[in-house]
Structure formats: structure tokens, C-alpha cells
Amino acid sequence: IFSCVSRLGWLKRMTQFKEKAGKDQESASVGLYSYPNLMAADILIYKATHVPVGEDQKQHLELTRDIAHKFNNDFKVDFFPLPEPLILGNATRVMSLRDGTKKMSKSDPSESSRINMTDGPDEIARKIRKAKTDPNVLPAHPKGLENRPEVANLFAVFSALADKSVEEVCKRFEGAQFSKFKEDLTELAIEVLGPISMEMAKLVADPGYLDEVLADGSERARTIARPILDEVYDIVGLLRPKR
């Protein structure tokens, strides 16, 4: 339904499509091109009013708002809300540990570019130790992070993990060596991410429990989504599927 509402121009402007398709957009798959429509469906099927997203996903939410607005306008209804983004914290866009101009991504071929939630203490320490920096001293103020993408990224990560402002982090490490900063960042990352890694390992070791949780969550989600989808079918004039 949303594929009939959204416009080619909207999808062509999506930054992630341009990045993943590269210069040869004609060879990109339809699935990659239309994926934002599915994201919009995932949001609007529950009539979400606010969505927690990272900075890199804000454009997708803006597209969702466009689709919701056009649907309401096309069918002369006040049905879908226009969801607002919730962009919280100091690390709304975490960048690669190897290149501060690129976002941290699980699809990056370099394992050293990211910290995975499943990484153990030794792996976290190794990746932070190898994280790219620069030869300049650590700044006393956030303005000193300008044009220093790798350093700014590490300070933002520290800020988020410590729940401190970037300004506080700058004051703490003013004039310090990168070795000291990385030691403290490593200790903090292990402290915060360690329990998450342990809990993930515990859950993965019990696939039966995971299946139960997924089945329960799926049924609860369907209970919310079914009546909304039925209303959409009625609005656009489609027959409701038999259940």
C-alpha cells in the first residue's frame, strides 16, 4: 500500500540508498530501493507518535512522515500520526574507530572499525587501543574537537558511556596523553558493555527461551497491528484477508 503512496523522487533522495548503491544505481536491487517503505510500515502499523532513532535514521523517519501525510491527504482521513524522532544522548551517530568520517557499521569489512555487543574485555581493549587518533594534544573545550573527527568520535563515545557532557570529558582529559584517555575509555567500555555481552551470551545459549520470547512478542505485536491494518484495508477499499 505504501509503495503506491510514496514517490520515486522521495526514495531516490535517501542517503543510505545512494551510499549502498554507489555509482551504479541501475544495478541496485528493488529491495534496497524500496526498503524505506517497509520501515515506514513498521512504524505506522502501530500508529507510533515518537520513534527513538540515531542521527543517520532521521531521514527515514522524515520519509515516514511524508508517507503518513500523503496517505491521510489522498484518502481524506486523519488516520496516521506524523511520528516525531527521539534523538537522545551525546552519541547519536557513532563513527568508525578507523575512520571518523564514516559511521560505525556491522557491515564494515574491518572488525577493528567497531565494537560489537558480543565483544569480550580483551577484544574491546584491542579495538580501542588501535582506534585512530591524531598527533595533537587533547583539548580543554569541545571547540578543540572541530576538524578532528576521530577524536571527536571517541570523546562522544566516552560522553555517552559515562553519561557526562562532552565539555566535562574535555575538562577531565585536558592536556592528557591519548594513552591515558584510551585506558580510561577501555575501562569504562568494559564496565558498561560487559554485562550486556554476558547477558547476550546467556540468551544465545538458551535458544528455546529465545523462541518463546519471539513468539510471545510476535503475537502481542499482531494483536495491536491487526485492527489498524483492517482499518487501512477499509480506507483504501481492499477486502480484508480471511483469518
Image (tube, rainbow, N blue to C red):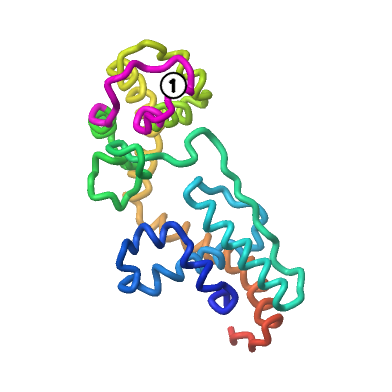
Task: Tell whether position 151 is magenta.
Answer: yes
Left or right, 127 with reference to 58: left
Q: Nearer the viewer, residue 69 or 10?
A: 10
Question: Residue flagged by tag 1: what amino acid is it?
Answer: Gly
Q: Which residue is mark 1?
A: 144
* Image coords of residue 72 (percent x, y): 71, 71
- At horizontal 27% and vertical 31% (from top left) the residue drawn is 131
* Image coords of residue 207 (percent x, y): 35, 56
Left or right, 37 with reference to 75: left
- Dividing the image into 4 quarters, which one contains the N terminus? bottom right
Q: Quadrant of residue 225?
A: bottom right
- At horizontal 25% and vertical 27% (from top left) the residue drawn is 129
Q: Quadrant of residue 5?
A: bottom right
- Which residue sits furthest top? 175
- Dividing the image into 4 quarters, which one contains the C terminus? bottom right
Residue 117 showing in the rendered view: no
- At horizontal 53% and vertical 67% (from top left) the residue drawn is 10
Start-end of magenta stretch: 129-152
Task: Tell whether position 144 is magenta.
Answer: yes
* Image coords of residue 38 (percent x, y): 50, 68
Residue 23 showing in the rendered view: yes
- In this picture, is 229 found above or below 146? below
Q: Nearer the viewer, residue 212 or 235?
A: 235
Q: Quadrant of residue 150?
A: top left
> Circle 1: is it few (<14), some (14-19), or many (20+) Cα within 10 Å?
some
Left or right, 220 with reference to 138: right
- In this picture, is 83 found above or below 74? above
**What secondary structure is marked by label 1?**
helix
Q: Nearer the viewer, residue 54 or 20?
A: 20
